[in-house]
Image (spheres, grey):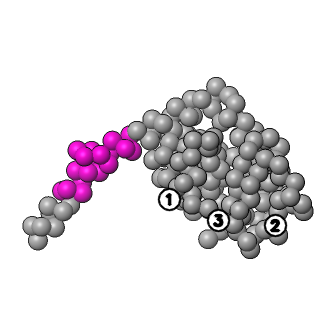
Amino acid sequence: MAGLSEEQTQELALGLKDSESYFLWVVRECDQSKLPKGFVESSKKGLIVTWCPQLLVLTHEALGCFVAHCGWNSTLEALSIGVPLIAMPLWTDQVTNAKLIADVWKMGVRAVADEKEIVRSETIKNCIKEIIETEKGNEIKKNALKWKNLAKSSVDEGGRSDKNIEEFVAALAQC
C-alpha cells in the first residue's frame, strides 16, 4: 500500500486547515509523525483519527466531499453513495480512476500535482472550496447523485447487475 510522503502529508494538512472547512482525516498511527508539529492540537475544525468506518462516514449527511487516493474500492463506495470526490491518485489504477471521476463521470475534481509530484496546499484548499462553494460544485454534487441512482437501479431487482447474477447462477445450474 502506498502512503503519503511527509511533504505531501504536510501539504494536505495545510490545505485542509486553510480551507476553513470542518474535516475528518484518518492518519494511521505510523504516519502521525509526518503531520506538521502541533497540527492535531491546533486543528479547531478538524478531527484526526487513526481509523474510522469509511462507509459510515461516507453516508453521513454532513459530508461535503471525500479526498481520496482513488483506489477502486473507495471509488465505488463514493460512486454508489453519491459523494463528490477530490481525486489525489498515487499510482497504478488510481490515475485512471481519477480521470473517470473528474472527466467522465464529472462527480469530482482532480487535485493536480506539481512537477515534484506534490499536490500543494493551495490546490487542496481550492479543490475543497470548488466543491463546497461554487456552481461547478453544485453540478458535481448533482452528477454524484445521478451516479448513485444509476448504481442503485443496476443492483435493484430487474437491474443489469441483478440480471447478470441470475444468468450466472442459471448457467452454473446447467453444469
Side (left or right) of 145 relative to 122: left
Residue 67 location (% of width, % of height) = 65, 50
The first of marks 3 and 2 along the sequence is 2
Side (left or right) of 119 relative to 157: right
Nearer to me, 87 or 151 = 151
Place residue 71 in its image quadrant: bottom right
Q: Secondary structure at mark 3?
A: loop
Mark 1, residues whose alpha carbon is within 10 Å: few (<14), some, or many (≥20)? Answer: few
The first of marks 3 and 1 along the sequence is 3
Q: CA–CA distance between discs 1 and 2?
A: 25 Å
Q: Residue at x 19, y 56 (%)?
A: 166
Label disc, if present, on residue 73 of the rendered structure: 1
Q: CA–CA distance between discs 3 and 2?
A: 16 Å
Q: Secondary structure at mark 1?
A: helix
> In the rendered image, which residue does mark 2 sit on?
34
Residue 138 against residue 10 in the figure, above or below:
above
Span highlighted in magenta in the image: 150-167
Q: Residue at x 70, y 56 (%)?
A: 25
Q: Secondary structure at mark 2?
A: helix
Q: Are marks 3 and 1 in contact (CB under 8 Å)?
A: no
| Amino acid at circle 1 | Asn
